[in-house]
């Protein structure tokens, strides 16, 4: 079946630095990928829709300059958290596939200290 | 807009007990409905889905039926195991996006 690989699984960074998270579709091409954020014991919040070769579509309230998304190929989307602060600490999950069965990455636990 | 309302947890059960997690939805059009499961520290895995009214999705002993008349998609399993301990999310697809319920934490005790 479809596999989505997300890397890294955990990252700790200092306040003010930037962190890049990769999301790869391993055995299929994904023109669209989705980035979610999940706070502890809460549901997933869609942050943005990543479109290959074009600008990402951000959900209301998500800062596009803070959460940079690049979808340069049909198998790779990246989320860069710029100038990270402790409040950006969260679990970030990507997904890809068809609407009838999206596949999710294993998630990235970001801790900003 | 589209939304999913899911039974609040946490739910704690003994092994071999019956599990049901309620899920209702609000949507325009005819969305597909999903149940996803999340194990600790991991991403989400698709558990089952239904794409039209009266469809029944099933997997690993779990079942859910797409009820258009009650706008519901309740998840059931007749005999749970410790390995079923996880967070379960109900979701619907609309405008090529998924909308998730709040999630229900299920703990099964031996």
Image (cartoon, coloured by chain):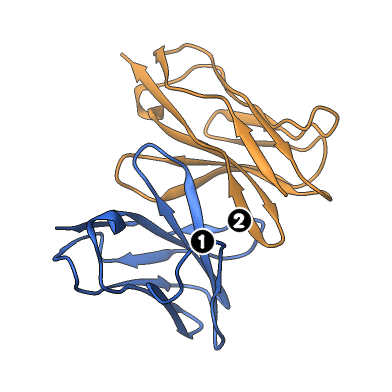
Q: Residues within 10 Å of mark 1 (few under 14, many from 20)?
A: few
Q: Colour of chain B?
A: orange
The chain displayed blue equals A
Disc 2 secondary structure class: loop
Spatial distance from mark 1 to mark 2, Cα to Cα? 27 Å
Query: What residue is disc 2 on?
Result: A101
The residue shown at (41%, 13%) is B13
Position of residue A57 measured from the top left corner of the image (x, y, whole percent)? 57, 73
Disc 1 secondary structure class: loop
Q: Is residue A38 visible?
A: yes
- The residue closer to the viewer here, A79 or B17, is A79
Q: Looking at the picture, does residue B77 appear above or below residue A23?
A: above
- The residue closer to the viewer here, A31 or B9, is B9
The residue shown at (61%, 53%) is B98
Which chain does the numbered disc 1 sit on? Answer: A
Query: What residue is disc 1 on?
Result: A61
């Amino acid at each position: 079946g479809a596999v989505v690989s997300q890397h890294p699984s955990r990252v700790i960074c200092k306040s003010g630095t930037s962190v890049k998270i990769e999301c790869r579709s391993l055995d299929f091409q994904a023109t669209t990928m989705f980035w979610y954020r999940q706070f502890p014991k809460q549901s997933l919040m869609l942050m943005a829709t990543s479109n290959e070769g074009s600008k990402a579509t951000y959900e209301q309230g998500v800062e596009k300059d803070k959460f940079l998304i690049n979808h340069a190929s049909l198998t790779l989307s990246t989320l860069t958290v710029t100038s990270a602060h402790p409040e950006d600490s969260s679990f970030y999950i990507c997904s890809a596939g068809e609407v009838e069965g999206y596949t999710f990455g294993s998630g990235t636990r970001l801790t900003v200290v | 807009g589209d939304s999913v309302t899911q039974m609040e947890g946490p739910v704690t059960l003994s092994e071999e007990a019956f599990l049901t997690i309620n899920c209702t939805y609000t949507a325009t059009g005819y969305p597909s409905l999903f149940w996803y499961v999340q194990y600790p520290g991991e991403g989400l895995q698709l558990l089952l889905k239904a794409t039209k009214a009266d469809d029944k999705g099933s997997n690993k002993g779990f079942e859910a039926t797409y009820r258009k008349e009650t706008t519901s998609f309740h998840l059931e399993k007749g005999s749970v195991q410790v390995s079923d301990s996880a967070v379960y999310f109900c979701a619907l697809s609309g405008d090529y996006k998924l909308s998730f319920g709040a999630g229900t934490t299920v703990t099964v005790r031996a």
